[in-house]
Image (cartoon, rainbow, N blue to C red):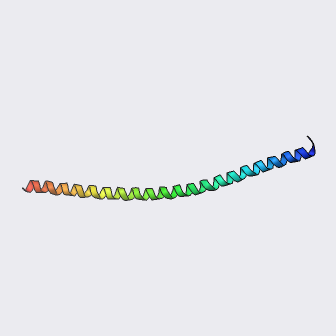
Amino acid sequence: MNESNRSASVDAELKRLEKRVDELVTTLLRLKDENRALRARQDTLAAEKTTVMNRSEQVRARVEAMIGRLKAMERSA
């Protein structure tokens, strides 16, 4: 292989590597954005879960209180 062919081969390999690095950088940026969005969604869902659990606990307490009042009414009747 002469010097010209080696130089062309090295140039081609460098271009291929440069393209691959660019693709990897693009993928990295996309994954960072996706990760950021997923973390935000996770935070939102965790907050919603807490809200639902609190409401469920409030409902349970109210139902238990109503049952207690109904039993008290039965005993007094």
The residue furthest left is 77
Q: Residue at x 69, y 51 (%)?
A: 23
Q: Residue at x 63, y 56 (%)?
A: 29
**Is 44 left or right of 13, judged from the image as shown?**
left
Q: Nearer the viewer, residue 66 or 33?
A: 33
Q: Position of residue 20 (x, y in %)?
A: 72, 49
8 in relation to 62, above or below: above
Q: Position of residue 49 (x, y in %)?
A: 40, 55
**Is 6 left or right of 24, judged from the image as shown?**
right
The residue furthest right is 2
Counting the numbered discs, the total is: 0
**Is 26 left or right of 41, judged from the image as shown?**
right
Q: Nearer the viewer, residue 29 or 11?
A: 11
**Is 44 left or right of 75, judged from the image as shown?**
right
Q: Residue at x 80, y 46 (%)?
A: 13
Q: Position of residue 16 (x, y in %)?
A: 76, 48
Q: Position of residue 5 (x, y in %)?
A: 89, 44
Q: Residue at x 10, y 54 (%)?
A: 74
Q: Quadrant of the N terminus?
A: top right
3 in relation to 61, above or below: above
Q: Quadrant of the C terminus?
A: bottom left
